[in-house]
Every structure is written in structure tokens, then in C-alpha cells.
Amino acid sequence: MSEMLESAKTKTDYFIHINLYFFFKRLIDILFSTVLFILLLPLFLFICLRIAKKEGRPIFNREIRVGKNNRTFTMWSFRTMTNGSRVIRQLPPYPFPSSWEKGVPDYFKITRDKNITFTDTGLWLAKYHLSKIPQLINVMRGDMSLVGPSPERPEVADYYNQQQMKRLKVRPGLTGYAQIKGATNDNHGQKIRYDLYYTQNCSYKLDVKIVMESIKRLFKKRNY
């Protein structure tokens, strides 16, 4: 009887702890994303004007992504490609099999059309990692978090198995554990494993570690 009570108390303490973590994580997301957006507002407006003047409209790129609890949302970013390339990119770049009964396979890889062309402003935005600034609005709205798994395409998430679905238990992030480990869509299985590790071990300490590592990576040379 005492063991059952102890087990129940442990589970209760865990749920209280994890709920408090997500509560304060959301408060931090709102606070930091709002402050960052205000600080970056002059740069945000400058980029809008530059894109409108040099490349024309649209200024923003809008993509449907899957967030927490399999809820879809519109993810915003600055347009970095020519309009023709933008249309090509929005087409499904992968033939999906008629059935992936056991979930999305580890070897799955999203392939891009090689004819995609970046604009002059797009190259500049990519060089200085600025194309994601509009996603701060997604964070403020609650679609995303500062830290979490990368937002998934609905076409891919539709094929998730029960294990892979667990990565959708938390909000997707501007950066995350898989990103700092270098796992991308080129290695879907490894990306999922890192994301599942994060969902099972998320904490303030791990979030700070991911943010600090992401900041360091911003200053590393990027190849195009």
C-alpha cells in the first residue's frame, strides 16, 4: 500500500513539475519573442522595404506546418527565392509511396529542385540567418516556441507512426536539439530520434544549452 502511495505521489510530483515547466516556458516564449521583435523591428521594416524595392512582392513566404498536437499553422519567413523558384519549392519535391505502414522510414529524404534561385536579398538574409525573424510572430501567437523540434510538413506528418507522433507533443521551435546536433531532413530517422530525446528530457537546463549552442552556430561560416 505504501509503495502504491509513493508511486502515485511520484507521478503527481512529475505532472506538477512538467506542467509548471511548460507554463513558464510559454511565459518565457512570449516575453523573449516580444522583446526580440521590438528590438529587431527597425531591421524587420528595413528588410520588408528592401525586398519590396529590389524583388517586389510577396515579401513573406508562408508555409503550412504541423505543430503541437498535430495542429497545422502558417509559418512565416522572409521570401528568399525568386517567385518562380518559390512556386517550384511549394510543389511536393518527393514522391510519397502509396503507403508507409510502419511510419516515415529513416532513409526518407526531401529532395529539392536544383533550378531554385535565391534573390540577392535572399542570399543576404541566408548569410546572416535573418529569414526566420517573422517566425517570432509565430512564437508570440503560440504556434511555435523558441526551442523545440523543427516544424514538420503535413505531407510527412500524415505518415507518422505512433512513436514518431510523440515529437508533436511539444511546440515546434526556432531551434532545437536535432538542429544543434546537425540532424536535418537529409537524415530523417536521426532527426526523429533527437526530437524524441528532447520531448522526453525537455528542461530549463536543456533549453538554455540549445539556445547557447544555436547562438554559437550563428557565427560559424555557412556554405551555400
Image (tube, rainbow, N blue to C red):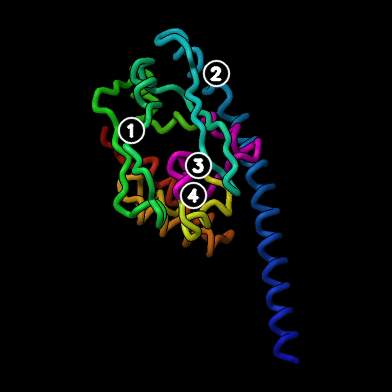
Question: Residue at 44% across / 30% down in the picture?
Answer: 130
Give the residue pinned by disc 2: 45
Q: Which quadrant of the view contains residue 30?
A: top right
Q: Amino acid at mark 1?
A: Pro
Q: Nearer the viewer, residue 12 or 222?
A: 12
Question: Residue at 52% across / 49% down in the picture?
Answer: 148
Instruction: Please give left or right for residue 43 compared with residue 35 in the image.
Output: left
Of circles 4 and 3, the one toward us is 4
Element class at badge 4: loop
Q: Which mark is residue 149?
A: 4
Of circles 1 and 2, the one toward us is 1
Contact (Cβ within 8 Å) of mark 4 with mark 1: no
Instruction: Please give left or right for residue 76 compared with residue 35 in the image.
Output: left
Give the magenta range. 133-159
Mark sitting earlier along the chain (4/3): 4
Instruction: Please give left or right for residue 46 compared with residue 139 in the image.
Output: left
Question: As drawn, which residue projects farthest toward the left?
Answer: 114
Mark sitting earlier along the chain (1/3): 1
Give the residue pinned by disc 1: 93
Q: Amino acid at mark 2?
A: Leu
On screen, residue 100 above or below 32: below
Q: Amino acid at mark 3?
A: Leu
Element class at badge 2: helix
Instruction: Categorize mark 3 by other alpha carbons within 10 Å: few (<14), some (14-19), many (20+).
Output: many
